[in-house]
Amino acid sequence: MPAEPTARPFLRGTRPRRRRALVAVVGAGLLTGGLAAPAGATDDDGGGGPTASAEPFGTTADGTAVERWTLSNGDVTMRVLTYGGVIQTLEVPDAEGEVENVVLGFADLAGYESDADPYFGSLIGRYGNRIAGGTFTLDGQTYQLPLNDGPNTLHGGPVGFDDRVWTATDVTDDDAAALQLELVSEAGDQGFPGTLTTTVTYALDDEGRLAVHYQATTDAPTVVNLTQHTYWNLAGEGSGDVYDHELQLDASAYTPVDETLIPTGEIASVEGTPFDFREPTAIGARIREADQQLLYGQGYDHNWVLDREDDGAREGSDGEDSLEQAAVLHDPDSGRTLTISTTEPGIQFYSGNFLDGTLVGTGGGVYRQGDGLALETQHFPDSPNQPDFPSTELRPGQVYESTTVFELSS
């Protein structure tokens, strides 16, 4: 008998929907829980197919060894740390064939271990985004989480999945360079109930598509909302701000927030607001308007409600039918384009508002406001306290499944 879906369909009344073509998912069997190839399998035809290799990347403050994995499809090279599942670099050619790293990060492990790390490239859990007051009630039991964002809990708490060392397994096959990461979060970790076993697979295919597949199970009722927190700059890491990047979001509504960036519960139309990205729009075009929502976030730091054909996430047993386009980001100067498709109902667009020139990146320069942006596919912030939002509850016997595909082209 198939596992019960983990998310309730979110009914959006009569808001218009637009049809979106499905994006092929790289790696046979990825959507059903992992690549079919045996661990350690690699392309052995000598023709420059997908490859994966590991090297030491130092040790954490408590002495845990960290690896850096290099995944390559011949044209695109990606470096992933077992610390936080971090995508440290992603090297992609532009329209002229010039290769540059298009994600923000640090050159060494100390940067990621620092309290100043703004989640560069990290896997986020147990709960991506904010939970109001760090508290929620499940089955009549109230849980208190540690606060790490003013009065709220952000991205799973002060020691979230971004601060943990994951176990890595090479699952590369003939179609994709792939790495499977696993983490067990014990009951009570950061205040969350249930022991959560999480597997995340990164798969990079030969057409520049990076599929990120999340799977999780629990031994007791809990809440879960996993995402990936890469900061993008398609002109190249360290090249300056992204305000000339053009963004399209397949969303006609968003969730307004209060002064602590917690959703008010309203699903608001983007029509006539700076939040209307239904057509490609330069990120800097309206970011300095005197809109109260922009003032709260010092720019964009909000969840958009995606216009989905299936009116919800993770419909169907294999997830393939619910993978739909969510966002397109384009840099006119380099010609690079990032297309994001997901099974999730929302996407958080964060315009790098709190980068303040105090962090030194992989290229040796400092990051200032707007030097990168994050597009985090997700369930909505504070969903455990918002009964009208799609549910983030996960129960024993259920399987949390989520997939996002990042497609890079030029």
Image: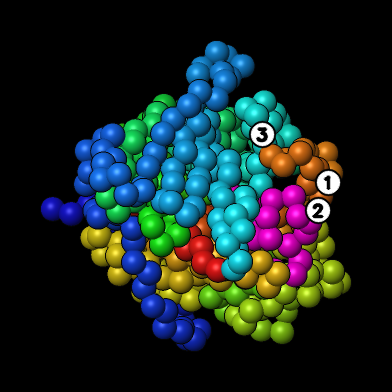
Q: Which residue is mark 1?
A: 356
CA gap, disc 1 and disc 3 = 18 Å
Tell me if I can see residue 255 in this picture: no
Please state the extent of the stretch shown in magenta in the rendering: 230-245
Quadrant housing residue 404: bottom left
Q: Which residue is mark 3?
A: 107
Identify the secondary structure beneath mark 2.
Answer: loop
Q: Residue at x 59, y 36 (%)?
A: 157
CB-based contact (under 8 Å), mark 1 and mark 2: yes
- For the rendered model, the colour scheme is rainbow
The image position of residue 155, as x and y in percent, is: 58, 43
Position above or below: 160 against 266: above
Q: Residue at x 69, y 39 (%)?
A: 362
- The disc, 2 or 3, on the residue closer to the chain's N-terminal end is 3
Dominant secondary structure, magenta: loop
> For residue 237: magenta?
yes
Residue 369, disc: 2
